[in-house]
Amino acid sequence: MKSLLSRFQANRALLLTLVALLSIGFLAGAQDESATTASVDQPATPSVGEKSAEGLTILVVGAHPADVFDQCGGTMAHHVARGDRVYCAVMTTGVRVHDKVISDDMEHAVSVPEAEKLNAMMEERSKVKQAEVVKACGILGIRESDVFFLGADDAVLLVNEPMIRKIARLIRTLRPDILLTHLPNENGGYGSAHATTGQIVMYAKSFAGGVDPGDTNPPHKVTQVFFFGQGSAAERTHLSSSEGGFYNDVFVDITDMAEKKVACFDALESQGYNGPYARKRIETCDGAFGRQIGMAYAEGFISLYSTRHYYLPISPEDLKHSRMSNHEVIDKRSHRINVP
Ligand SMILES: [Zn+2]
């Protein structure tokens, strides 16, 4: 049991340990010129290697427009507030499964419009959703030029080489220390844009470690990958409860950012995440993670790599928690945000 605990604590301390280490890169771009100013293929300002003294560079890749907020909005807000560079990439337009007009209204229609009209409608709704993402990123302090829309159709997203090349190019250009994305095995690893996105990012991560003719950016190796825990390891918090499956070995206390996260959801109106859903979501997902780990609201992650240390890693949060009484822990995790 002790060895399990040590392993768990060591893994959980990973994020904080990494936080002490690396540096920052820079660029702006997007595939859809209507939303932002540059493209993944031809970055507008490829300032490779532009680094601050201790800042981290983080790239978050979500399958659908809401995923980056849903899975790690509070964590992104922490890093932005600390001065780290946080980039967001959205793989698909998300219009088919998460849009008020294209998915919901069509559900009860007698028939859907002809292809040409439907395509035009989807393009229009895609822009609405992009604008919502940009607005929500703004709430977290992420600038519009740091948001990338890959524009893939969310009908059938398969692992494909062009998209792998685009993400790899993004990695070589932005030079992230940390990648955040979906677990490639989510829900069995098939039939889901989440799992496919995770797989594409993993291929891209490997490819970015080498050269690509046409991309003048040098190879880049990512230091760590954190997979989103919400979709893959809901409420599992330690090795013995994972039963051979996945569990979150890193939790980030997002209590101080929970209201911002609700504001992000409120911005995602086309998705129906605004209003009551936003409030329910923060309590039932981030609140549930928090309850499990002794925090009010938390985001969970599954780290890809083992980590290197000279001493055994223990985070300040873990030390503080282990010295709290049971009632102090209950008080801490009972805290609720009060957003109208
Ligand atoms: Zn999603």
Image (spheres, helix red, strand yellow):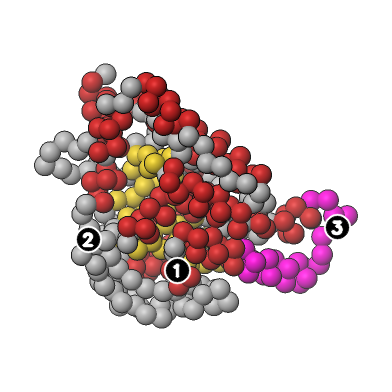
Q: Which residue is mark 3?
A: 111
**How many residues crowd mark 1 within 10 Å: few (<14), some (14–19), many (20+)?**
some
- Mark 1 or mark 2: name the one nearer the start of the chain: 2
3D distance between C-alphas at marks 1 and 2: 20 Å
Q: Is any part of residue 74 visible from this angle?
A: yes
Tell me the magenta residue range. Answer: 107-129
User: Is 203 positioned to the left or the right of 284 in the image?
Assistant: left
CB under 8 Å between callouts 1 and 2? no
Magenta region includes residue 122? yes
Residue 142 sits in quarter? bottom left
Badge 2: how crowded within 10 Å, few (<14), some, or many (20+)?
some
Q: CA distance from mark 2 to mark 3?
A: 56 Å
- Considering only vertical position in the picture, is 308 above or below 84? above
Q: Which mark is residue 54?
A: 2
Q: Could you say which is closer to the camera, residue 105 or residue 191?
A: 105
Q: Which amino acid, mark 2?
A: Glu
Point out residue 90 in the picture as x, y percentages from the top left corner: 51, 61
The residue positioned farthest toward the right in the image shown:
110
Q: Residue furthest left?
A: 310
Residue holding disc 1: 143
Sooner in the amino-acid sequence: mark 3 or mark 1: 3
Disc 3 element: loop
Q: Nearer the viewer, mark 2 or mark 3?
A: 2
Q: Secondary structure at mark 1?
A: loop
Where residue 9 appears, x then y in whole percent? 27, 32
